[in-house]
Amino acid sequence: MFEDTVIQLDPWEAYNQKKKVDASQLTVQDYVEIAIYVKRHCRSYNTAVSHLQTILRDINTQMQFNPELNQAFLRVCNMLMHFYIRSKNLKNAKLVFDGLMVSGRWEGYLEEHSVSVTTILNGIQTLGTRADAYQIVNRLLQHKQMPAHERVYVTLIYTLHRFGDIKGCRYYFAQMKQQGLPVSESLYRAMIQACIDANDSQEILNLFNEMKKQNVEPSIATYTMVLKALNNEKDPNKKNKKLMDQIFEDLMASGADLNVSVFTAMGWDPLQALEEQKRLEVPLRTRDYNACLSHLLKMNRSEEAVNLYRNMAQTGTEMDRFTYGIVMDALLKDDGQSPKVVYDIYDEMIHHGIKPDNVIYTTLLSACGKEKNVDRAISYMEEMATFGLKPNIHNCNSFLTALSMSSKTFYSIRKMRNIWLLMRHIGIQADTRSYNIYLSACYNIMRLERARGREYYQEPQEDDMGLPKMGPCRYMIQSYRAMKEEANPLAQPDFATYTILIKSLAYTGYTRLAMQIYEDAKMDRVKLNVSAYNEIMRGLERSGKMSDIMSICLSQKQEQKRQKIESDKPKNARSKRFLKNREAKVVENPKNTLIIKGSTTSQIINDALKDLYALKRPNAVHFSKKNEIKPFEDEPKLEFFSTKNDCALMVVGTHSKKRPHNLVFIRMFNHQLLDMYEFGIEKAECMGSIPGPKCSLGLKPLMIFNGEKFDSDSTYKHLKNYFLDFFNGEQTTAINLAGLEHVISITATPDDRILFRTYSVQMKKSGLKTYFSAQARHVVSGCQDSQGT
């Protein structure tokens, strides 16, 4: 393509030099080849887009002298669309497609026209909606530019099937047949797949029979799809043994090569499928064993998969790269296996002369990360060059993970930075995961150095640009700004990126930079991890910036309200009534109480919780099983229980050596912790141990508070307010004397004890104008001699 003096240069530089010498000499193939090079090897998203757009401008300029370059223009446009879609930028891909549609350049170029339509439809499958697909198709029909090509209709059917539109699939399948376009197996397979997801076995059989009538020979893959659809156990009508046997006989008569996938589609166990294939004297190939291994792993039968591999090795069965890769991946994911087993299988693969690929090395590097073995990871990266392999993004991410988990003393920030720059230099486009691993490694190194008594930053120092003057934080900020400036959709900061940066900067004293990153996260509406909030608040507290702390707290509350509003959209009438019942009201609903047992309880605590539940019914929920909860440490768990059960009040009972017979009374406001009171029970007598009638369900008690502390001491005032709220029940406008069945007496003693007693009230005729006289009888001392703290 280029002269000898030019080909030694970088391909992009060679292209520019050739263009300067004589651009008219560039052919269609020249433009296509340089576009392919840019698409595959450009290190930056912005650079790749800019180069492709430059190529299109150059082609457009030369087209006035050479109209044949229109083919190159269309092909490069298709590459640009594909690059946008691969980078998850459907919007720009649609702009390119719309420009082609309006320009009229497709006329006379059916192949390029079809590729343009299928490219945008494939992008809509993964990034768009059904409305986007119909918009594209309707515009093509409106402009009479719908290509009469089978590939377009196959892609359209797969796209509509992706969105569950079986009616649309049937419509365009019929349209294609009406136009008299040639049909192939790929079209029928697309329709069969759509019908499988629609659970329409009868239509699947009709399509299968229609294929044979149209003299379209079904492949082994089509037979497998049909058998799998008939073996669907969700609907008894589909599990038709007779039909399956008939189709299997047709398959045998067709002379197609049987494989394990056919038997597993019919519901056979993978290992039994291998035996059946042997019984039918069908030769077992490596592909059959690989399929069996894959099925076993999908069924979480990794041990049987490993045993099958060992049996293959003992019997001398031929194995390929995929066999070893499947087994290595299974052993890597098995927590009970050592990573050294993965290395042994790799050595065995090399011993048999099988060349590894990038997937194999990704598994090996992941095993190194699991073992925290940096030396072996480096040796594998160096070994790739001996097999002519170039590391891809997955290899580099696994390698960076192994480095980030290392605790080697020679492993420094500078070496980590050099590895990162080398990765970018060889043309690997870093994604979000790459950046996160690199940032996490820098953060871990700082923590490791601090644990060894060394600080990177005695005092935070910034340069004129606002960057840290040295060390890991400087590299981290540079990487973050590179992510923002590059505007690559595959390498944008996510919640992990912001969390790592905020924690690192706040940890080292760069609170101003941490607040800037925090504001960026708010602008992007990213939900941060709780640890990020805790670290930045600690950093602000050390700096004395209380106003920023209050601002963060306020932002958290606003974000919680926003998320609650977004998540509480009812989907049906029942949900709407439920959420309406939870809305704020002029007269509140009675507060529900959640009774929770801790991880360890005593019989005294169990009886106390049972009595409190009896006094609070029906406005109470009792968790009969034990829960691992520490009220003064697990605030998020308390808020979760409160929100999940719609309870504003909670009681947690625990028992330990240091805190025997412990009760914690909790009150929430808007499902957020308001206050807590902790008591230790010293002497108790449960309600069930005292004979006599108990109060009826749901009645409000009379509350009596004895002791001057309830009027003078602020703690006891709060406690009085809590118990009034706890036993308040439903709001009433009138009192029926007969409904006053029990009294709760709470007494504050001078030695900081609280006596909790309940009494039943028996009404008797008095013979006076007052209809009843009340006689209180002591019923229970639920938590006598309780000590409040």
Image (cartoon, grey):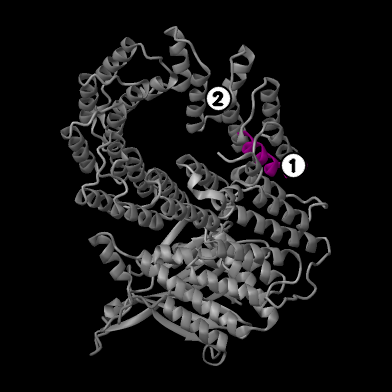
Three-letter residue code for mark 2:
Glu
> Tag 2's secondary structure?
helix
Three-letter residue code for mark 1:
Ile
Check residue 304 in the rendering and tell me which mark sits there, or answer none.
2
Residue drawn 40% across and 15% down?
258
Residue 25 % position (x, y): 50, 44
Magenta residues span 360-375
Check residue 378 in the rendering and tell me which mark sits there, or answer none.
1
Q: Nearer the viewer, residue 503 or 382?
A: 382
Q: For residue 409: magenta?
A: no
Give the left or right position of residue 625, taking residue 727 as reference. right
Residue drawn 59% across and 37% down?
333
Q: Nearer the viewer, mark 1 or mark 2?
A: 1
Residue 479 % position (x, y): 64, 62
Q: Residues within 10 Å of mark 1 (few under 14, many from 20)?
A: some
Give the left or right position of residue 371, taking residue 198 as reference. right
Q: Quadrant of the N terminus?
A: top right
Based on the displayed image, in which of its 4 quarters is residue 158 positioned?
Answer: top left
